[in-house]
Amino acid sequence: MINNNTKLFDFLPYNSNEEFNKLINSIEKEQSLFYVIQAVKSAYKRGCFSLEESEIISKSLRVLSTPDKKEEA
């Protein structure tokens, strides 16, 4: 059962199983990357990673969040 104040990754609210299922069924590639990045950031805030892991994850997030130079041209 879902609490009416449930938030995924500390930012994404939903109020029912129906809303959750609608969200799950609407996820596409671009949203998937966004949600993975938010999940990692949320886990980091909760202290889930070592210092070394955090450094690798931070760099990886910057790489994933920065548009390719080819895409900018």
Image: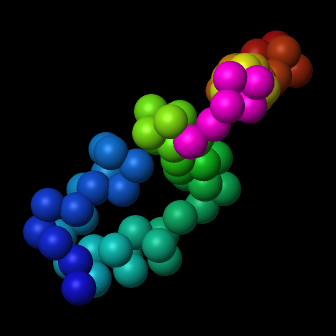
Residue that appears at 38% across and 80% down: 21
Count of numbered labels shown in the rendering? 0
Q: Residue furthest right?
A: 70
- For the residue pair 38 and 65, the one nearer the viewer reads as 38
**Figure coloring:** rainbow
Say which quadrant the C terminus sits in: top right
Q: Position of residue 34 (x, y in %)?
A: 56, 43
Residue at 44% x, 39% y: name it: 46
Indicate whether 64 appears above or below 7. above
Q: Which of 3 and 63 is in front in this view?
A: 3
Residue beneath the point at 66% across and 56% down: 29
- Residue 61 at what x, y percent from top left? 68, 28
Residue closer to the observer: 33 or 38: 38
In percent of width and height, residue 32 lies at: 61, 54
Position of the N terminus by quadrant: bottom left
**Residue 37 vertical position relative to residue 29 in the rendered view, above or below:** above
Question: Does residue 61 appear in the picture of this structure?
Answer: no
User: Residue 52 lies in magenta, yes or no?
Assistant: yes
In the visual, does 46 lie left or right of 18?
A: right
Start and end of the magenta stretch? 48-53
Q: Position of residue 44 (x, y in %)?
A: 53, 34
**Furthest-left residue in this view:** 4
In the visual, does 63 lie left or right of 58?
Answer: right
- Residue 19 seen: yes
At x 22% / y 77%, what residue is drawn? 2
Residue 66 is drawn in which quadrant?
top right
